[in-house]
Each structure stands twice: as structure tokens, then as C-alpha cells.
Amino acid sequence: MKIFVTILLAIILIPVSLLAQDPHRFDTEIQKFKEMDVPEGDNIVVFTGSSSIRFWIDVASDCSQWQAINTGFGGSQMSDLCYFLEDAVLKFKPNQVFIYEGDNDINDGKTPEAILETTREVTDKLLKALPELKIHYISAKPSPSRWQFKAQYEAFNALLKAYCESHPQLSYIDVWTPMINEKGRPTPHIFIEDSLHMNRKGYDLWRDVVCGGVK
């Protein structure tokens, strides 16, 4: 009987351990944010999230109307950002923040509803610390390498859009639609060889949609 109970508990706990995340796997990257200087003046804008933000190395020049700071950390999920909000966003006391998360969450098997719940936590923490902050949530992007999750991404984007429309300080930025070609698939020439991350053409598109679409 004891052996049976032990085996049963092991089976039950396996999914929990597999899904558990240790945010401290990002400690090296977060340390860099801790060491960054906080710029003086107004119009400070933080771009944060997973690798699509991290690899946007020209965000400061692409979005030159602001003092743009990039605190993207590749591989992150919404829960990781929630954990590191102080170092990734709040220390800079920005007027606005652009957030790209959800892409890795879906790929990791999280449901759109679960991601949105964490998104609400992120919003609450940000506005508690910075009540006047404007928060822009960038939709999950379509990518050839993760096209099998199309339905989940679209469901998350729909939830995220509705959530942003329900709150006066939030906005939803749709990068999914402009990244889809006339065949209804991700535009291939805007991605690098891994078919997941964007090349300069992809970031040109983001510059126009993300930076050009927000005042």
C-alpha cells in the first residue's frame, strides 16, 4: 500500500515539477538591469519582455521620440516579468512601458487564460507603484516555427485585446495581423534562419506598428 501511494504521489507531482519555473535562471541578465543607470528627464519608456524585445537592439533609434530603455530577457514568460518588475521596469520610473510576453508561455503549454491572469498581476503591480503609467501590451506574434500553436496564440491575443480595452491605462498593439501574408501565414522573409526571431525587416515593421502607432 505504501509503495502504491508513493508511486501515485510521484505521478501527480511530475507535471508540477515540469511546469515549475525558477525565475532565478535569469539572474545574470537581471543583474545587468540593476547596474544600468536611470536616465534623467521625462519621456522615459521601457521596452521589456522576451527575446523579441531583447533582440530589438535598435529600439532607442527606432523609437527616438522617447528615451527608450530595453530590458528584454530572452526566454522569459509573463510570470518571470512579474517576478522581476522592480529591476526590469519600476527602477526607471517610466511614463510608458511596452510589454511583449506570452509567446514562450504558449510554447511552454500554458493556457491563454492562465497567461492573462498573470498579466493582470503585472498590471496591478505596475499601477500600484506608478499610478500614472501607460501600459502597452504587444500581441503575440506569428512565427513559422510555432505555427502549430496558432489557435492558442489567437485565443491569447483575443483575451489580451479585450482586457486592454477594459482598462483606460492599457492599450493593445496588434503585431499579429501585419506579420501575416496574403496566404494567411507568417511572412517568411521577416524572420532569421530559426523561423522564430525577426530580422531587420521584421523590426522595421515593429517600428512602424509599435512606435509609430503610439503617441
Image: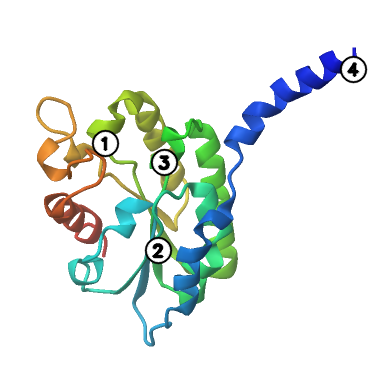
Which of pointers 1 and 4 indicates the residue nearer the eye? 4
The answer to whether residue 180 is above or below residue 63 is above
Distance CA(mark 1)–CA(mark 4)? 49 Å
Q: Position of residue 62 (x, y in %)?
A: 18, 66
Which of pointers 2 and 3 indicates the residue nearer the eye? 3
The answer to whether residue 3 is above or below residue 47 is above
Q: Earlier in the sequence, mark 1 or mark 3?
A: 3
Is label 1 in contact with label 4 (beta carbons under 8 Å)?
no
Which of pointers 2 and 4 indicates the residue nearer the eye? 4
Q: Quadrant of residue 55?
A: bottom left
The answer to whether residue 31 is above or below residue 16 is below
Query: Tag on residue 97?
Result: 2
How crowded pointer 1 is (Cα within 10 Å; few <14, some 14-19, many 20+) is rated as many
Q: Residue at x 58, y 35 (%)?
A: 19
Name which residue type carries label 3.
Asn
- Which residue does the numbered mark 3 point to in the structure image? 104
Q: Position of residue 122 (x, y in %)?
A: 54, 54
Q: Earlier in the sequence, mark 2 or mark 3?
A: 2
How crowded pointer 4 is (Cα within 10 Å; few <14, some 14-19, many 20+) is rated as few
Q: Residue at x 10, y 41 (%)?
A: 189
